[in-house]
Image: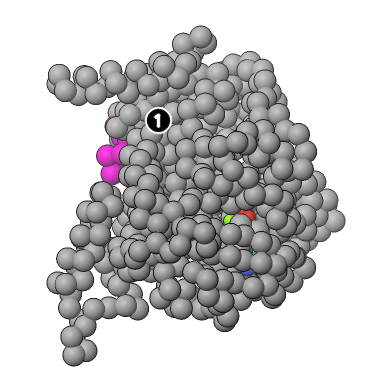
Amino acid sequence: MDVDVAPKPAEPLLQLRGISKHFTGVQALDRIDLGVRAGELHVLFGENGAGKSTLINVVSGTFPPDEGSFHFEGEEIRHLTPQRARAIGISPVFQEFSLVPSLTVEENLFLGREITTGGVLRAREMRKRAQALIDELGFDLDPSRRVDDLSRAHQQMAEIAKALLGKVRLLILDEPTASLTERETGRLFELIARLKSRGVGLIYVSHRMREIRTLADRVTVLRDGRHVRTLDAASSTDGELVELMTGRKIDLLYPTITHKPGKVIVDVENLTLADGSVRDVNFYGRAGEITGIAGLVGCGKSELIRAIYGIEPATSGAIRIDGAPYEFPAARRSLKRGIAYFPANRTAEGLALSRPIRENASMTVLDLPAFARFGVLRQAAERAKIGGIMAQLQLRPPNIERAAGALSGGNRQKVMLARALTRELTVFLFDEPSVGIDVGAKLEVYEFMKSLVEAGAAVIVVSSELPEALALSNRLYVMHHGRIVAELTGADRTEQNVLSSFFRDHLTAEVA
Ligand SMILES: Nc1ncnc2c1ncn2[C@@H]1O[C@H](COP(=O)(O)OP(=O)(O)OP(=O)(O)O)[C@@H](O)[C@H]1O
Ligand SMILES: [Mg+2]
């Protein structure tokens, strides 16, 4: 990380005026002004589809703006390219990953800026530089590993490391903590503090209020591609930010869910996974009840529900669905058995990006009688049903005929959610249901879960956000290092008890 001397504080590091960007049918950015000072962390806040990622893409030279002016360190910039942006110290970490999966971390870091002498690659030098950078960041990341062998958290760390190699004047982070572990998030925040003290400016996108509170100096609120207001973080409230973002008053509370636990629908006995991420786990989920699984990122809770759905191999143990053994789970059969799964990772698992939203949302239902008659898709029925569901989830822009690939990150996730509402299902597995979606959509998702469970479905929710796990579940399991360390019900479901069950686990581990 080379950081130069800070410019005069009076002069903003980055100054955008009247920036617009149009895509077919959408005005993604409409005359946006944005100023970012040296040493400042500036949060972009807005609903899914408000234009945050598009703005970042303009700042980092990926999309040329249709109009507007762009000044960086006092100089007017025209025809910015990604290469030029990097050269002047604008370093983006995108929401969608940019690493080449078949290359190692260090190969990715130096891609396009290899160190050579007389045309010969200096592998050892590059390895040393990569390792030194990763050490400085304090990340637990092996630079010689191939990217496709890494967990999502480690891929995210590699992305961040890549952005910090070379000169950095403005660091841009688009939802960087969505898949980081608690520990790595802490490391990232320390790094941010160091960068700020050296005069680096930061643009930071997040939907997490707590994070915004911890990090932000100023917040710019965007709505429908327009600049709504820029505020000092210290003198604004959460409610105010959310109201500016949505244009209406929003109750930040969780819905009141009536749980009526019935029979056991999902029953897991002594389950152990091949990669050791889940060890000897016993748990059950009942009809008419939300069962929560809390724990830190990386504790094995996501792997646990992925194994039930059949996308993570188990080595031993048994799964029963509605009383009948479910051997060799596989995604295709899971749907037939009435199990739906919502991944935390909204792009990797399952959207056909070039196809319309409508098709993506109905993909799992084409074999249902309501949609197909004599093999012919009943288009009107499909359109009406998917249209209704997407309206409920507040799709932006509300057009189900657009390609899924043209959607913002959070809106892609809503398409994944819509799939569930279109089928007769009895078990719903949610992995981190609210990561990456805005506050308004979050409430819709909670309402959706409420309606599922009150209609008698068995809902299992995995969440790293403790308040969310506590508020939604009737019974809450706590996982730690691949094992279930507590089951909390009723008044025992408190933040304190969840945290102390981690602590107990540490104590037992030390004694053993
Ligand atoms: N490549 C593209 N082609 C067409 N439309 C696009 C493209 N990228 C973004 N859009 C549209 O531009 C608008 C702004 O999207 P953007 O990705 O900037 O939203 P965002 O604020 O980052 O949302 P999120 O919180 O969901 O990530 C949306 O209406 C989106 O559908
Ligand atoms: Mg985005």
> Is residue 396 depicted above or below 216 in this figure?
below
Could you tell me residue 502's position as x and y percent? 32, 23
Q: Quadrant of the C terminus?
A: top left
Horizontally, residue 451 falls left or right of residue 410, namely right
In this rendered view, identify the residue nearer to me: 378 or 5. 5
Q: Which residue is mark 1?
A: 295
The quarter of the picture where residue 164 lies is bottom left
Residue at image x 57%, y 33%?
A: 427
Q: Residue furthest top?
A: 491
Horizontally, residue 244 falls left or right of residue 294, namely right
Could you tell me residue 92's position as x and y percent? 46, 63
- Our reading of the magenta stretch's main secondary structure is loop
Question: Does residue 512 appear in the picture of this structure?
Answer: yes
Residue at image x 63%, y 33%?
A: 237
Horizontally, residue 178 falls left or right of residue 188, namely right
Q: Residue furthest bottom?
A: 118
Residue at image x 34%, y 50%?
A: 194
Q: Quadrant of the N terminus?
A: bottom left
Could you tell me residue 336's position as x and y percent? 58, 43
The segment highlighted magenta reads 272-279
Category of crowding for the residue at label 1, using alpha-carbon neighbours closer than 10 angstroms: few (below 14), some (14–19), many (at least 20): many
Could you tell me residue 406's position as x and y percent? 65, 64
Horizontally, residue 221 falls left or right of residue 347, namely right
Local SS, label 1: loop
